[in-house]
Amino acid sequence: MRVPPFLLMQGLLTLLALCGCGYYALCLWSAVRFLKRREKTGSGTFLPPVSILKPLRGIDPEIYASLRSHCLLDYPEYEIIFGVSDPADPAIAHVQELAREFPQHPIRLVMCEHILGGNIKVSNLVQMLPEARYEFLLVNDSDIRVEPDYLRRVVAPLADVQTGLVTCLYRGVAAPTLGSRLEAMGISTDFCGGVLAAVEIEGGLRFGLGSTLIFRKADLKAVDSFAPLLDYLADDYQLGQRLAASGRVGYLSEVVVDTFLPAYTWRAFFDHQLRWARSVRDSRGWGYLGVSLTFGLPWAMLNLLVARGAVWAWGVLAAVFALRLTMAAVVGLRVAGDWQVRRWWWLIPLRDVVALGVWAVGYLGKTVVWRGDRFLLRDGKLEKIAR
């Protein structure tokens, strides 16, 4: 007997919703393991001198306070090296102000005159690296704000000579626009859970996050330094992957830092989400396909529509929604420490539906927008599109 198409659709959507439940459960289990490890971890007494490399381009929200937080670190010896490629970059004024406010700190500005590849951040890092005096290097994005004990805690795992990279999670501090709040909810209640789950599935950390990358200069040299990353969009992911391939162990720090999100318009929000999506699709094709199994709540909502409001479909939706909110609470509140989750938890269904749409659109092209420039993405590498 032939099965009607709408029943097949119901079966498929129910299966996808249940797969989403499995993903939420995996995130919860991974979060609990991470929290147990956090309880046993201290800052340690391993305090080598560190060179902090901060490539800059333009002005991010709350940029001065974020840069300033790196000058307030409770750490015995470190330097901060800033790099810009444009002599008219407005970020330069903030670096100069920092140098005036903190004359006791070794703060230097490097003019990175050459554009060496499509990724300006990495181009700057290549030219900043020779200025770094110390063996231990820390790279993080310009919109990251940290606490005074940050450097003590993120450097501690490198006391183990087998550890080659430390990275950390982050939470987005939203501006007062819907797009910014949706992204903040996505970071704390989904992205962080996905990172924790990936570490468990892959048996360790095999990638990096731009919020923090700390490593030894010798290990960086062993993977040919920053130069191979010059045209990659996901340079942080690539660096972590290369260090792992070289035999170095990655470590996901217990530290969670803040990143300040722009007041996105809908278009800017969509462009940013699509850049993330296409970066993942281009670097991990099968992994990107597997992301379809993580959208439990949207699939359950679609299932309810296809089932025309059947009681059993309401039951599936209620179960999926309850597990999604539980995961959001544990990962967003306990792991990420994001107070915004209490205030804007009701945006999670909308955020998840938008994320499913972005995931689907991610298959429909290869262009991305990054800091106002358009690029074509081929095998993870950037080709700039002329205006």
Image (spheres, rainbow, N blue to C red):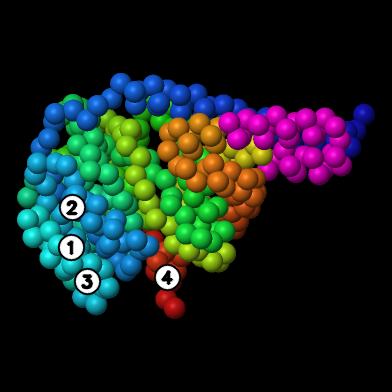
**Residue 62 vertical position relative to residue 317 in the rendered view, above or below:** below
Left/right of residue 328 with respect to residue 34 in the rendered view: right
Q: Which mark is residue 71?
A: 2
Mark 4–mark 2 distance (CA, rounded to whole Å): 30 Å
Sequence-first disc among 4 and 2: 2
Mark 1–mark 3 distance (CA, rounded to whole Å): 9 Å
Residue pictured at 48% horizontal, 36% vertical: 333
Q: Amino acid at mark 1?
A: Leu
Query: Residue 113, position in %: x, y?
Result: 18, 71
Sequence-first disc among 2 and 3: 2
In which quadrant of the rendered view does residue 291 lie? top right
Prevailing SS of the magenta stretch: helix
- Which one is in front in this view, the residue at disc 4 or the one at disc 2? 2
Camera-side residue of 129 and 228: 129
Q: Are marks 4 and 3 in contact (CB under 8 Å)?
A: no
Q: Which residue is mark 3?
A: 93
Q: Which residue is mark 1?
A: 98
* Image quarter (top left, top right, bottom left or bottom right) of the C terminus: bottom left
Sequence-first disc among 1 and 3: 3
